[in-house]
Structures are given as C-alpha cells and as structure tokens.
Image (cartoon, rainbow, N blue to C red):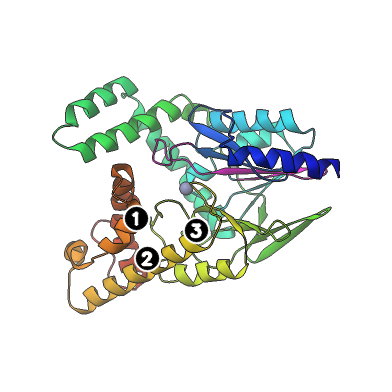
Amino acid sequence: MFRSILFALVLIWPSFGWAETIYPGYEWRLVDEGIYLHTQEDPFAGPVDGNSIVIVNEDDVFVIDTHINPAVARAVVSKIKSITDNPVSYIVNTHWHDDHINGNATFQNAFPNAEIIAHPYSAEKLKDEWRNLEESRMVAYESLTVERILEVAEAAEADDPMRAMNLRLYAGYVGALKPELPTLEYVYPTKFVSDQLVFERGDRKIEVHWVGKGNTEGDLIVFLPNEELVITGDMLVAPIPYAFDSPMQEWPTTLAQLKKLGAETIIPGHGKPQKNMQYLDQVIDLINALLSQVDQAAKNGVAYENLADAVDLNDHRKLFTSGDADAEFAWKNYFFDPGLNSAWVSLGYTPSVKE
Ligand SMILES: [Zn+2]
C-alpha cells in the first residue's frame, strides 16, 4: 500500500517534466514502478546513443542495453547502487550495435554474476565485428581533437550546413569515445534467445522475445505484460527510424507482431517513450511505402545509382521531421539513404556498388 501511494506521488513528477541528470546530456526518468529510462536529452546529439532501461525487481535488477560510452554506463551503475542493494542479474542486448553494448563490461564488472542475453545472430556479429569496429574508430580519432573538428564545422556552416552538422555530430563521438575506447573491454553474451525466455519476479513478469527480423536480424524485445510496457531496441526508434543494413522486407510484419502484444507504453531503442501505437503505425506505413517504391523503381529498370530520385517519400518525411533541421539530417542519413540500400538488397536486387 505504502509503495503504491509513494509511486502515485512520484508519478506526478514526470508530468511536470521531472527528470534527473546523472550524466551530462542524458535524462534519468521513472517510467513505471521500479522501471527507469536513461536517455539522451537531445536524440540528435553526438554520439548517437541507445536508451538504457533499468528494471528494479524485488530481489534483482535487469538492464536492457548498456550505452555506447562506458563512462555513461558507469553513471547508470552508480545510480542503480544508490537506489537498490539488489544485484543486476541479467543484461539484455537488444541487438549488436555498439550504441547498445559498449557498456556491457562496466555492468558485468560491477555485478560479476550478471548474465548477458542476446539473440544468436547478435552474438555472432559481436564476435566477428565489434572489436574491429571500435579499433578502427580509435585509429580514426587518434589525430583528432574536438576543438579542431568544431573549428572546421564553424568554417563550413555558411556554405554547407549539412556538413557542419555532420562535423558537430562527429565531435560528439570523438569527445565521448576517444578517452574510453583504449580501455574498452569486450564482454560477450552468455545466454541466447532465439524464441522467448520468461522470467517471473514476484508480481512482475519479464518476457524476452524475438518476434522476427526488424532493424537487424536478431532484435530482441522485452515485454512486461503486467505493466503493458514493451522495450523495443532499434526495431523502433523515435523520432526518426534507423535503417542501416536492415532486413526491410520482414520488418513491417515484425512490427505488426510487436503491436499484437498490446502494450500501452513503448520504450524505443532511441528517443522518448511512446504512449500510443500511432508512431508504430507511421513507421510501418513508411517502411511499406519505401519497399513498394523501391520495388516499382527496380521493375521499371531504374539503376541503383538513380534510386533516390525515383523514390518520393516527401509526405512521410514531413510527417516525421516537421521541417526541423536536425530531424531532416537524421532522416537523410539514418533512414532514407541507408534505407534505399537496405530495401534494394532486402528485395533481392543486386547489391549496391556502395557496399
Ligand atoms: Zn541504436
């Protein structure tokens, strides 16, 4: 009873904009009783970083995704230790991209008995690509400083604002990751889910599902039926979806499966929680429109190089970006350009020369 009253009081705060800063540029928010979201204040800031979700149960803690920057993961670990004595027993990696897994070792070092859960596809990708990806980043950053990149960005602002935006974003990566990557530890999944795994924790049920191919082939989602809450990883990203090397053809069906769970609250892989299905429906419509237009263009004999001119998603673009410059940048660089390639490959046409 006391817990419920306390929670009812706490719930009032978010409606007044309550959010705590435990790491600069991020917000720590209560989403439901014992369920916290750590998310970037500005979803377009660099480095682009995934959400991390902390679920505090009666006797243990689950963490869903661990951020790109181990320093941010350390802040989340400290926060967990300040609110509960319970250990983290499970870390779920929704997929293999580094903005969701670079903090794995930080959590496992703090909670040595924690198991890391992932889809077997993600585990394979991590084994094959993770270390190379971060080591090549380290080499690229070696001679760069944030100050120098920002100077170049400022000089580019007038003639090429898109390039300036890209440089500022890059400065965010260099500033956050250059000090961290030399000591990054590579900790791999220890438990694999290719269908579903259900945990009972008192009144709470935590279900880890693979509902189909989405943003990657191995996206796991976490569903809490009693709270009617689903954590999607990058299968859903707000306010602009990501489409890097995604199995586009299967993605709308997978999102429809996700919708069938009937959650009231969706916590996407990046961005703010969604309180209804409207955004999910908009993303399904968008991917279907991209797929059908790319397919039609290919059937009309349009070459891959000319695909961008043959696909008109402007109505969708306006709906997603509302004309905001940062959102337009994300639309082009995170959805439209990579999405053309993903759709082309996913529909079985000859892989692009860009790859
Ligand atoms: Zn991500």
Per the picture, the main secondary structure of the magenta-coloured stretch is loop
Label placed on residue 286:
2
Q: Residues within 10 Å of mark 3 (few under 14, many from 20)?
A: many
- x and y percent of residue 259 in the render? 56, 67
Q: Which segment is the magenta one?
A: 41-64
Figure quadrant of the N terminus: top right
Q: Earlier in the sequence, mark 1 or mark 3?
A: 3
Distance Cα–Cα, label 2 vs label 3: 13 Å
User: Which residue position holds label 1?
Assistant: 335
Nearer the observer, disc 2 or disc 3? Answer: 2
Q: Earlier in the sequence, mark 2 or mark 1?
A: 2
Q: Dot 2: few (<14), some (14–19), or many (≥20) neighbours within 10 Å? A: some
107, 124: nearer the viewer: 107
Q: Quadrant of residue 260?
A: bottom right
Q: Quadrant of residue 75?
A: top right
Is the CB atom of the residue marked by disc 1 within 8 angstroms of ligand 1's nearest atom? no
Kindly indicate the quadrant of the structure image that contains residue 175. top left
- Disc on res. 65: none
Query: Disc 1 residue type?
Result: Phe
Residue that mark 3 sits on: 235
**Image check: 208 left or right of 141?**
right
| Viewport quadrant of the C terminus | bottom left
Q: Residue at x 51, y 47 (%)?
A: 272
Q: Which structural element holds mark 2?
A: helix
Whether residue 145 is visible here, answered yes or no, is no
Distance from Cα at disc 1 to Cα at disc 3: 13 Å
Residue 43 sits inside the magenta stretch: yes
As measured in the structure, the alpha-carbon distance from the residue carrying label 2 to the one carrying label 1 is 10 Å
Task: Check if residue 173 falls in the magenta segment.
Answer: no
